[in-house]
Amino acid sequence: MARQDCQDLHKLAYNMTLAKIISCYLKIMRKAIHKLIPELYTTCTKHAKYRYCMSVPTIWSKESKNIMREAAIMTGSITRYNKPEKLSIVDEAVAPFLYSERM
């Protein structure tokens, strides 16, 4: 993005990072997931056993995906010490195929 293209972008509030902003949204999703999954699947009550999969735009860089991973860590969904498969970050073009494989 050229410097002049960035002039219209809003600056982040003091001490806010992209990961922190994304984590606010993910916390809301996590809370809803932890409420809904046990209602739908009564045997899935242990949140620590949950695995997460997030789809991101195909053009996102490794750095952008790492920001998403950092945001997930901030929510408590995963820790830095979890195995990588605890959180899968996949390109949005791949996500439908992964979903259909499990059906």
Image (cartoon, rainbow, N blue to C red):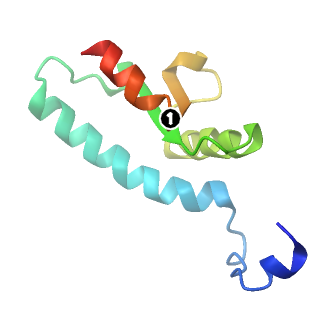
Indicate the amino acid at tag 1. Ala
**Which of the 4 image quadrants contains residue 6?**
bottom right
**Closer to the camera in the image, 55 or 45:** 55
Please, which residue is most extreme toward the bottom here?
Answer: 8
Residue shown at 72% from the left, 70% from the top: 15
**Closer to the camera in the image, 91 or 78:** 91
Residue 103's x, y, as percent? 24, 15
Residue 57's x, y, as percent? 57, 45
Residue shown at 67% from the left, 68% from the top: 16
**Which of the 4 image quadrants contains residue 59?**
top right
Say above or below: 82 vs 65: above
Left or right side of 40 for 77: right
Residue 78's x, y, as percent? 52, 31
Say above or below: 46 vs 92: above
Say above or below: 101 vs 16: above
Say few, some or many: other residues with alpha carbon within 10 Å of mark 1 (under 14 / 14 to 19 / 20 or more). Answer: few
Residue shown at 18% from the left, 39% from the top: 36
**Closer to the camera in the image, 94 or 28:** 94
Quadrant that contains the N terminus: bottom right
Name the residue carrying label 1: 93
Left or right side of 60 for 71: left
